């Protein structure tokens, strides 16, 4: 199937992810990758603002704790219609595969009020990219869909710039049309609708994604957090100090088999809270670990 550049006859490097226009690609928009991508401006700044204000609005509803706040928080999370225009993700395991936007939003809200509420209240869980580390059922596919919907406004604006930059999008039989889409208004902190022009590819609107914003695996996944930072914390805390001053640590392969360190996300929650009691921020340590190793991985590729 043709990529965007092949379909439109665009040559040379392009500032957007060159996906197959005919179907889903095994790429996922990664909120942390957006945050540290370095550009393009103003889109990366606007996308980060959308992500932060949305998640802040939701978690503030948890912290307020009254019925009106609970209704508002749940309603905010139930507005994630599947954003198929990017051609990212896998439709079979996206919103359709999880019972729709309402079910996904309800799952996240119930977890925020249950298993991870303590993380919200101490300020540990404060960014959208941290959700898959702690919420069962939220992985790269759902994270990508949620993030896309929250940053849909900046993506539409980026696509509009690309339409002006590359005349091939509307040359010959190619065309762009105006669409009304739901976007997050980070000023008013509410969902709203706007009109914007999108190119048409294979009879369907196409939303362009800046390079560096999508990957095959999330930078901040549950298993990566568990296998690096969480198990390292357990190793250090439970190490035995020998008479000659050495620390004997249990191998991670052994720790992975222990019943008290399963399942992964429940262990992540418990050990993260336990570490905070000891004045250690495992989430910040993990983020530093991820950022330091980003340059050792290839863009839009594997970073398990």
Image: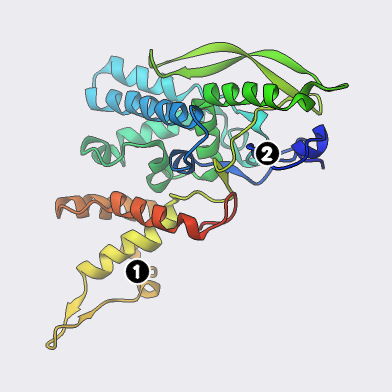
Position of residue 291 measured from the top left corner of the image (x, y, whole percent): 40, 52
Colour mapping used in the image: rainbow
Q: Tell me: residue 303, above or below residue 203.
A: below
For residue 37, side relative to residue 172 (left or right)? left
Q: Tell me: residue 211, above or below residue 58.
A: below
Is residue 76 visible to us here?
Answer: yes
Q: In which quarter of the image is residue 209?
A: top right
The residue nearer to you, when weighing 103 against 230, is: 230
Quadrant of the image for the N terminus? Answer: top right
Question: Under tag 2, what secondary structure?
Answer: loop
> Which residue is the extreme one toward the left?
243
Position of residue 258 measured from the top left corner of the image (x, y, whole percent): 34, 69
Eye-nearest disc, 2 or 1: 2
Position of residue 191 measured from the top left corner of the image (x, y, whole percent): 46, 15
Q: Distance between the residues labelled 2 and 1?
A: 48 Å
Q: Residue at x 73, y 27 (%)?
A: 166
Q: Earlier in the sequence, mark 2 or mark 1?
A: 2
Crowd around label 2: few <14 · some 14–19 · many ≥20 (10 Å):
some
Crowd around label 1: few <14 · some 14–19 · many ≥20 (10 Å):
few
The residue nearer to you, when weighing 83 against 44, is: 44
Q: Residue at x 79, y 21 (%)?
A: 170
**Which residue matches tag 2?**
14
For residue 49, side relative to residue 97 (left or right)? left
Is residue 263 visible to us here?
Answer: no
Q: Residue at x 44, y 58 (%)?
A: 293
Q: Quadrant of residue 152?
A: top right
> Which residue is the extreme one toward the bottom?
244
Residue 282 numbered tag: none
**Which residue matches tag 1?**
258
For residue 97, side relative to residue 293 (left or right)? right
For residue 239, side relative to residue 200 (left or right)? left
The mark tally for this picture is: 2
């Amino acid at each position: 199937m043709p990529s965007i550049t092949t379909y439109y006859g665009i040559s040379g490097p392009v500032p957007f992810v060159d996906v197959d226009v005919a179907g889903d690609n095994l790429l996922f928009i990664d909120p942390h990758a957006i945050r540290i991508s370095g550009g393009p401006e103003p889109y990366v700044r606007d996308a980060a603002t959308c992500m932060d204000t949305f998640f802040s609005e939701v978690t503030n509803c948890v912290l307020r704790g009254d019925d009106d706040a609970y209704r508002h928080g749940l309603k905010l999370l139930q507005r994630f219609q599947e954003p198929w225009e990017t051609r990212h993700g896998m439709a079979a395991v996206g919103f359709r595969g999880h019972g729709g936007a309402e079910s996904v939003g309800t799952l996240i809200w119930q977890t925020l009020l249950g298993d991870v509420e303590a993380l919200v209240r101490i300020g540990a869980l404060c960014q959208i990219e941290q959700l898959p580390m702690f919420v069962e059922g939220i992985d790269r596919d759902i994270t990508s869909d949620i993030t896309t919907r929250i940053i849909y406004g900046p993506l539409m604006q980026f696509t509009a710039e690309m339409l002006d930059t590359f005349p091939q999008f509307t040359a010959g039989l190619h065309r762009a049309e105006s669409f009304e889409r739901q976007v997050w208004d980070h000023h008013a902190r509410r969902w709203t609708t706007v009109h914007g022009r999108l190119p048409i590819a294979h009879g369907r609107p196409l939303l362009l994604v800046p390079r560096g914003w999508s990957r095959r695996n999330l930078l901040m996944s549950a298993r990566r957090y568990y296998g690096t930072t969480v198990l390292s914390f357990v190793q250090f805390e439970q190490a035995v100090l020998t008479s000659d001053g050495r620390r004997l640590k249990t191998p991670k392969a052994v720790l992975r088999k222990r019943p008290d360190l399963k399942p992964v996300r429940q262990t992540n929650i418990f050990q993260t809270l336990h570490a905070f009691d000891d004045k250690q921020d495992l989430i910040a340590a993990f983020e530093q670990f991820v950022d330091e190793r980003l340059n050792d991985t290839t863009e839009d590729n594997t970073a398990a």
